[in-house]
Amino acid sequence: MAVYRILPSSSLPRLSDENLSNTPLIWRGDFVEPERLPTEESLEGIPLTQIPRGELEKIFSTKEISEVLKYIKEKLKIKIVNYDEVVDYLRRFPDILHLLQDICTATRERFPTAELLLDTTADPEIDLQDLTIYVRYSEYNEETLRDLTEGIDEVTQRFNDAFKHQKGMILIYDDLQPATKIE
């Protein structure tokens, strides 16, 4: 199965409507149904070109990923640990890039005073890797532990349905490590 994307080159061939039926399409970075694509008149001659399924991760350029990560780091004050690994993960699972910023924003809103870190975690026993947002307080007591549990549950419940059809995963976790000063 192929994926199609709008590309800004008038030299590429136009695909026929028959080629578009029952085929996932990408418009401005998001999957859309063929009937939800802009009309040909609004495309002003921009052609559709075929991209092999294995090349899908290249659609989400380093620039798009770095813009989201810059927002997360600078605006939400979330420390990105192992930046290159996070970028590699997002390249392998571009379907979650659009969710990452929303989940990080919701986590920051729920934990405004906590230190938040974004990193990859691996489970070598089952060869699985995920993105993880760690929530850390400078000290832990009964109140902060309850707040951690309730807050993580609130944010994860809010986004659980969004991951039903995604291949990548974003976890929110408390590792009970003390917060460090955010640089």
Image (cartoon, rainbow, N blue to C red):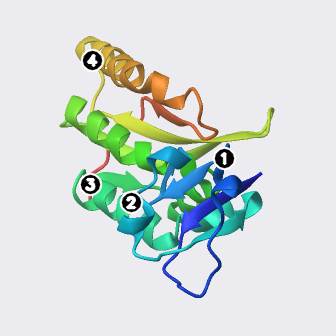
Judge left or right: residue 91 versus residue 177.
right
Give the Cα separation between the discs numbered 3 and 2: 16 Å
Label 4 with label 2: CB-CB less than 8 Å: no
- Residue 182 sits in quarter: bottom left
Label 1 with label 3: CB-CB less than 8 Å: no
Mark closest to the chain's N terminus, 1 or 3: 1
Say what secondary structure mark 3 lies in.
loop
Give the Cα separation between the discs numbered 4 and 3: 21 Å
- Residue 68 sits in quarter: bottom left
Find disc 2 in the rendering and name its residue.
Answer: 69
Give the Cα separation between the discs numbered 1 and 4: 49 Å
Find disc 3 in the rendering and name its residue.
Answer: 182
Find disc 1 in the rendering and name its residue.
Answer: 21
Mark closest to the chain's N terminus, 4 or 3: 4
Mark closest to the chain's N terminus, 2 or 1: 1
Residue type at mark 2? Leu
Say what secondary structure mark 4 lies in.
helix
Say what secondary structure mark 1 lies in.
loop
From the viewer's side, name the closer residue of 160 and 125: 160
Q: Residue furthest bottom?
A: 11
The residue lying at 59 percent from left, 36 percent from top is: 166
Judge left or right: residue 126 versus residue 139.
right
Give the image location of residue 18, x and y in percent. 69, 54
Give the image location of residue 66, x and y in percent. 42, 67
Q: Return the mark for residue 147.
A: 4
Residue type at mark 3? Ile
